[in-house]
Amino acid sequence: MNQKRKQHAPETLCVQAGYQPKNGEARILPIVQSTTYKYDEADEVAKLFDLEAAGHMYSRISNPTVAGLEEKITILEGGLASLATSSGQSATLLAVLTICNVGEHVLALSNLYGGTFTLFTSTLKKMGIEVSFVNHAASAEEIQREIKENTQLIFGETIGNPGVDVLDIERVARVAHENRIPLVVDNTFATPYLCRPMDFGADIVTHSTTKYLDGHATSVGGMIVDSGNFDWEKSGKFPHLTEPDPSYHGLSYTGKFQEAAYITKARVTFLRDMGNTMSPFNAFLTNLGIETLALRMDRHSENALNVAKYLSKHPKISWVKYPLLEGIPSFDLAKKYLIKGGSGIISFGVKGGAEEGKTFINSLNLATLVVHVGDLRTHVLHPASMTHRQLTEEQQVRAGISPEMIRLSVGIEKVDDIIDDLTRALQGPPGSTKSNNRDRR
Ligand SMILES: *Cc1c(COP(=O)(O)O)cnc(C)c1O
């Protein structure tokens, strides 16, 4: 990547960063639909296997189309290198496994995506990695109290899903670094266009590229971005990154790859052994999506702020949370971390409770009920009975999920049409007493 590109504005990088064609090559990132790569000499392939030479060998481990996407996201996040994965879940899993071994501990901020919560409390637990939780708004002292001898990382979300609380990345990063451990931030809801967690001290960023980065709801995918800033050797807590690895003839990741030790290990051990690979076609579509990320995030943010203001004044709405809506608890943090916009997700409660919430969802027309967020269509969902269904009621409360909570992913349609749809649905199902469907026609 050339330095000049890194200095361009994010809007420009969304369009131009990543794949750079050479003379006579395809202008658009090509889909290299090939599992394998041809070499002339046996020794060349041996060198690839020994990590002595860089190059594509087998598409489980790397692929030119996927590499083009990785490069674009690396530059957008201001990181050193990235690794694409088959899903956001895989990104979270590999981000943790590259750091933690059996018997070690992860401290997570509490306002997590439901899938991350079950991964942490069920699957990682079965693998012998313990995860405990601290409130996302906890003070530095409170976070420090939860750190144990075997805590290897802190994990949080820039904007929590679905509570939309904004994380004080600087504060949490400071605590992590005082304890010689890295901070991993899931930046799915903000995207690098609205926030770059590494600018505030995050060491590793993860994404579900399935959401805004793709933006069109076509491709499940994930990404791990390494800042290259965390000093694994100086920390002394990560021998599996600094000491010889017998599965690579005794190579040390920090010895051989210096600041790229973490992201290289993630690829050459976990992608090699577990195969959570992104397909070239998904990488192509996700790359295409990111080309319009800046335009979309501006529109999502503008629409969502307008919808949040509208809902906050509606008599049938009991509460509204949106990062840039004045009066919500993390408003000051949102103003610090999300200067360009608050993204497209709103959560709110319909007066009455869960049943009224469901009736409202069933009455929407333009906004569709899907298990998804962050694409260009307006979507709605009821977290308590859907994405966070596997959590106990107490876990739901700790994750910021109340029974009446509705999560609205505001799309890029004309905002008047979105608000009309909400207005009609809040009047109740068609045929109910107050419906004015007919008047509107
Ligand atoms: C959706 C999501 C994930 C999981 O990603 P998948 O691509 O669905 O596997 C992780 N974190 C957040 C914040 C998400 O919204």
Image (cartoon, rainbow, N blue to C red):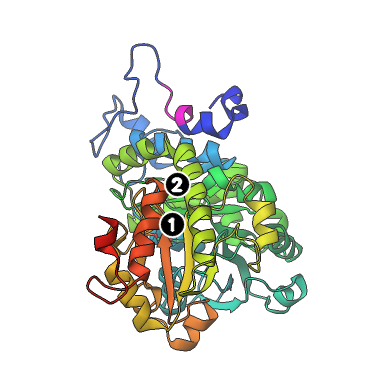
Q: Which amino acid does label 1 sit on?
A: Ala
Q: Tell me the crowding category of disc 2: few under 14, some 14 to 19, or many 20 or more residues within 10 angstroms, Cα based.
A: many
Question: Badge 2 is on which residue?
Answer: 83
In terms of depth relative to the viewer, which is nearer, 208 or 127?
Answer: 208
Dividing the picture into quadrants, the one containing residue 44 is top left
For the C terminus, the quadrant is bottom left
- Seen at 55% across and 62% down, the residue is 322
Q: What residue type is labelled 2?
A: Leu
Dividing the picture into quadrants, the one containing residue 139 is bottom right
Determine whether the beta carbon of the residue marked 1 sits less than 8 angstroms from the nearest atom of ligand 1.
yes
Question: SS of the residue at dot 2?
Answer: strand
In terms of depth relative to the viewer, which is nearer, 242 or 400?
Answer: 400
Q: Please state the horizontal and vertical placement of residue 200, each as a whole percent of the image.
A: 69, 51
Visible residue check, residue 432: yes
State which region is magenta: 15-20
- Seen at 37% across and 73% down, the residue is 382
Q: Please state the horizontal and vertical placement of residue 153, each as a whole percent of the image.
A: 61, 65
Q: Do the residues labelled 2 and 1 touch (CB within 8 Å)?
A: yes
- Seen at 33% across and 12% down, the residue is 24
Dividing the picture into quadrants, the one containing residue 352 is bottom left
Indicate which quadrant contains ligand 1.
bottom left
Question: Badge 1 is on which residue?
Answer: 91
Residue most toward the top?
A: 23
In terms of depth relative to the viewer, which is nearer, 24 or 302?
Answer: 302
Left/right placement of residue 343 relative to residue 227 reads left
Could you tell which of marks 2 and 1 lies nearer the N-terminus? 2
- Which secondary structure dominates the residues rendered in magenta? loop
